[in-house]
Image: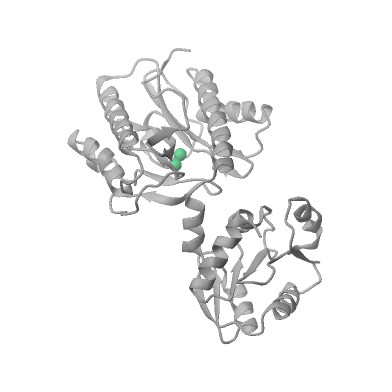
């Protein structure tokens, strides 16, 4: 049994959970090593305290799942099978009665829950999500190396995007060029929809790139991430296209100061809240508190948002192996939007930024 499943089994024994029925692509991948998105078809990994786990997935994927290294049973179902009959049989072969089952409550849909209720009529259902989030929060060496690779490609994308800025080009044209350049390098997937936002558009924290043309004196915000072997990176850089005014500079300098201070404050033993507040106080003291409307950052890995969540109230203590973003921003409508985001790894004596594109204001004069 792999160590991740063993850790889940230890938790199950401690909490008298007889079966964990894991259904999200991300958690199935984390535990089994096999990733698939079967859309509306069923995907599940059933884990027991002692008995052999099994995967259930569309039969056309059985071959790939075996090749992924999964050594335990795989139950394939065709489009005319009822997968729940097969699940029932496989569970009955292993255990007779289920009184407590763990499921991903935030992921499970009602139809599947009703199927499980039919299979385990006397069971109490508890959430497996919190435990899986805590397991995924601490990355091993291989995960860190993969994220580093994703970060290096994100750095490249920012550099390429900045070099593509030209007066009159649209946000979408720049976006297209940088994603094309990534595909040329073999990147198959972005972590989320790439953002290239210029001028007033950058003042919206979750704006949509469009046909706005880039003009001299704009701040241009790039927010993007690259997926490598299922692991995400996430970087934001805001660059100046031509010379910007003093107000824009002041906002940029404030965000940079907050970002660097939060990075400096990140180390084992401090809480997520302390790190968030380190940045938040700097922004508030500069008079921009109301223009920083989101948390400081989020964990990332297989998912673009995972634990730890860096909010001003989270008492969670930092530990070696955590990977998360530090991304303060100031968004003043019609004036400027600036965000600077690094992916950061907690090490034994501090933290290192895994994204490395320069953070001093880059003034692009293409
Ligand atoms: Mn981002
Ligand atoms: Mn982010």
> Which residue is situated farthest in the bottom direction here?
122
Considering only vertical position in the picture, is 218 above or below 35? above
In this view, the residue in front, 31 or 258, is: 31
Left or right position of 110 against 93: left
Residue 343 in view, yes or no:
yes
Indicate the quadrant where residue 176 lies. Answer: top right
Provide residue 335's location: percent of width, then percent of height: 30, 30
Indicate the quadrant where residue 172 lies. Answer: top right
Residue name at image x 51 percent, y 26 percent: 158
Residue name at image x 34 percent, y 46 percent: 295
| Quarter of the rendering occupied by the N terminus | bottom right
Considering only vertical position in the picture, is 102 above or below 365? below
Display coloring: one colour
Left or right position of 347 against 290: right
Provide residue 222's location: percent of width, then percent of height: 46, 31
Indicate the quadrant where residue 267 lies. Answer: top left
- Write down which quadrant ligand 2 falls in: top left
Residue 332 in view, yes or no:
no
Counting the numbered discs, the total is 0
Left or right position of 169 against 326: right
Provide residue 302's location: percent of width, then percent of height: 56, 48
In this view, the residue in front, 99 or 249, is: 99
Provide residue 219's location: percent of width, then percent of height: 38, 25
Residue name at image x 78 percent, y 55 percent: 66
Considering only vertical position in the picture, is 280 above or below 361? below
In this view, the residue in front, 79 or 122, is: 122
In this view, the residue in front, 320 or 112, is: 320
Left or right position of 150 against 53: left
């Amino acid at each position: 049994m792999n160590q991740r499943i063993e850790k889940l089994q230890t938790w199950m024994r401690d909490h008298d959970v007889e079966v964990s029925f894991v259904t999200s692509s991300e958690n199935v991948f984390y535990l089994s090593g096999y990733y698939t998105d079967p859309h509306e078809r069923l995907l599940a990994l059933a884990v027991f305290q002692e008995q052999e786990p099994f995967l259930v997935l569309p039969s056309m994927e059985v071959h790939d799942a075996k090749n992924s290294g999964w050594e335990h049973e795989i139950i394939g179902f065709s489009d005319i099978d009822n997968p729940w009959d097969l699940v029932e049989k496989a569970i009955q072969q292993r255990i007779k009665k289920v009184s407590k089952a763990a499921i991903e409550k935030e992921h499970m849909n009602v139809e599947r829950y009703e199927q499980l209720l039919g299979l385990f009529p006397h069971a109490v259902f508890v959430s497996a999500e919190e435990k899986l989030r805590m397991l995924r929060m601490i990355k091993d060496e291989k995960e860190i190396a993969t994220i580093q690779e994703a970060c290096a490609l994100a750095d490249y994308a920012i550099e390429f995007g900045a070099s593509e800025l030209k007066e009159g080009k649209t946000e979408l044209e720049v976006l297209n060029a940088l994603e094309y350049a990534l595909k040329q390098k073999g990147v198959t997937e972005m972590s989320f929809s790439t953002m290239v936002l210029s001028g007033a558009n950058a003042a919206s924290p979750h704006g949509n790139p469009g046909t706005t043309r880039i003009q001299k004196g704009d701040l241009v915000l790039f927010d993007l991430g690259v997926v490598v072997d299922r692991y995400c990176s996430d970087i934001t850089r805001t660059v100046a296209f031509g010379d910007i005014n003093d107000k824009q500079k002041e906002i940029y300098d404030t965000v940079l100061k907050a970002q660097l201070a939060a990075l400096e404050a990140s180390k084992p033993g401090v809480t997520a809240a302390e790190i968030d507040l380190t940045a938040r106080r700097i922004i508030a003291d500069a008079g921009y508190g109301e223009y920083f409307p989101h948390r400081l950052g989020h964990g990332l890995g297989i998912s673009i948002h995972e634990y730890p969540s860096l909010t001003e109230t989270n008492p969670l203590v930092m530990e070696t192996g955590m990977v998360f973003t530090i991304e303060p921003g100031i968004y003043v409508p019609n004036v400027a939007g600036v965000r600077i985001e690094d992916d950061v790894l907690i090490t034994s004596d501090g933290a290192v930024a895994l994204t490395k594109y320069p953070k001093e204001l880059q003034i692009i004069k293409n």
